Amino acid sequence: MVVPVQPTVDPLKAARRAGDPACDVYLTGTVFLDIIFTGLDSAPVRGTESWARGMGSSPGGVANMATALARLGLHTSLAAAFGDDHYGEYCWDALEQGEGIDLTPSRTVPGWHSPVTVSMAYEGERTMVSHGHEPPPDADAPDGGAPSCPPRARAAVASLTPGTRAPWIAQAARSGTRIFADVGWDDTGQWDLAGLADLEHCEAFLPNAEEAMRYTRTSCPRAAARALTEHVPLAVVTLGAEGAYAVDGRTGETAEVPAIEVEALDPTGAGDVFVAGFVTGTLAEWPLADRLAFAGLTAALSVQEFGGSLSAPGWAEVGAWWRRIREFDDQDPLALRRYAFLQSLLPAASRPWPLRRAVPTIGFRSA
């Protein structure tokens, strides 16, 4: 039996008003079944067999973001296609029953097999091999894909594709949904901001440093962030081991927060967790620097577990980290003050920790 995860903190409690949407965040995309190998000493070598010391399975793809948001206490709705195979059943069960994610906009597709990704983590990086096919068109969706009329929501997270518009993004923005966007690597090599047509509907854009510099033709990620505010109100650029930098073009405010040093087991899904943390802080109306700090913290906690979606931290992990970090006498007081805003959010007692994690057997059930 899967025990649903029940967040002990509602980070939006102070910001909720009568008449607000029931859905906090809406997402759509592809759910993969992730099989993760960890503990590899090096990259696999052609013609040899490599043994991994660790293995896990979990829902992946857009499920990484959906799970990260749900574990932070946001009411999350996901529109995705699921295969009617065992992989699809496992992913559906893990997300709906295990994480409390609303799958009402999702569908099960008879005869379609679930996309699968094998991820290998080594030397702080990862290599992935994926397989899958596009699902058949959805007869209930005018464009055959994502619903053209997504549910009313406070926010939505979109992954922009160069040269392609997603009609649901404009529809959601017109209904008052705040759009947060990230982007993947531009395989065309053009790196043309004009090709990200849906950026005009977005409130915030969260690329990594390399992506930001390529799109803005700059050589400094901070300069890139400033340049991006000519196209989107809020630009957030992740700087890897250096942390993150943000510019609010509406107010001119900037913020930079260093990364938290941790021993990384698997970086899969860390970028999604960062975005989820930042969306949470934004909807909760926190100061810009607090949003960056929280996003960086949640991402750092996630890389200490293997797996994508199931490595996402909840408030139990955040609370445990905050209590533990203050026990060390050599902590920098300035660094501690950076995260002092957590104190008022965290409950005195938390539910059992840790959360459900990726396990070696697909479909494994915790009693």
Image (cartoon, grey):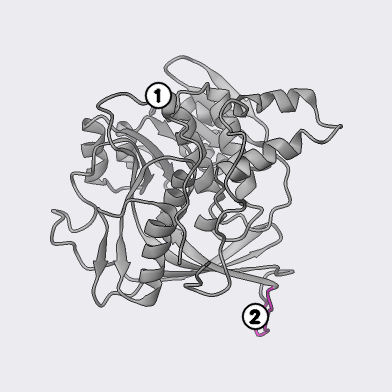
Count neighbours of disc 1 (C-alpha within 10 A) and say few if under 14, some if 14 to 19, many if 20 or more.
Answer: few
Residue at the limit of the structure toward the top, as seen here: 251
Q: Residues in magenta?
A: 45-52
- Left or right of 67? Residue 210 is right
Residue 323 lies in magenta, yes or no? no
Q: Nearer the viewer, mark 1 or mark 2?
A: 1
Q: Residue at x 59, y 42 (%)?
A: 350
Count neighbours of disc 2 (C-alpha within 10 A) and say few if under 14, some if 14 to 19, many if 20 or more.
Answer: few
- Where is residue 74? Give x, y as percent: 41, 40
- Left or right of 363? Residue 268 is right
- Where is residue 10? Give x, y as percent: 46, 34
Label 1 sits on what residue type?
A: Ala
- Determine if residue 201 is in view: yes
- Where is residue 269? Give x, y as percent: 53, 53
Q: Main secondary structure of the magenta part?
A: loop
**299 vs 5, nearest the viewer:** 5
Q: Residue at x 75, y 23 (%)?
A: 334
**13 vs 310, nearest the viewer:** 13
Q: What number is the disc on residue 46?
A: 2
Give above or below for 250 relative to 22. above
Label 2 sits on what residue type?
A: Arg
Lower sequence index among marks 1 and 2: 1
- Determine if residue 220 is in view: no
Residue 49 lies in magenta, yes or no? yes
**9 vs 43, nearest the viewer:** 9
Mark 1, secondary structure of its residue: helix
Q: Residue at x 61, y 71 (%)?
A: 55
- Left or right of 259? Residue 28 is left
Is mark 1 in CB contact (under 8 Å) with mark 2? no
Q: What number is the disc on residue 15?
A: 1
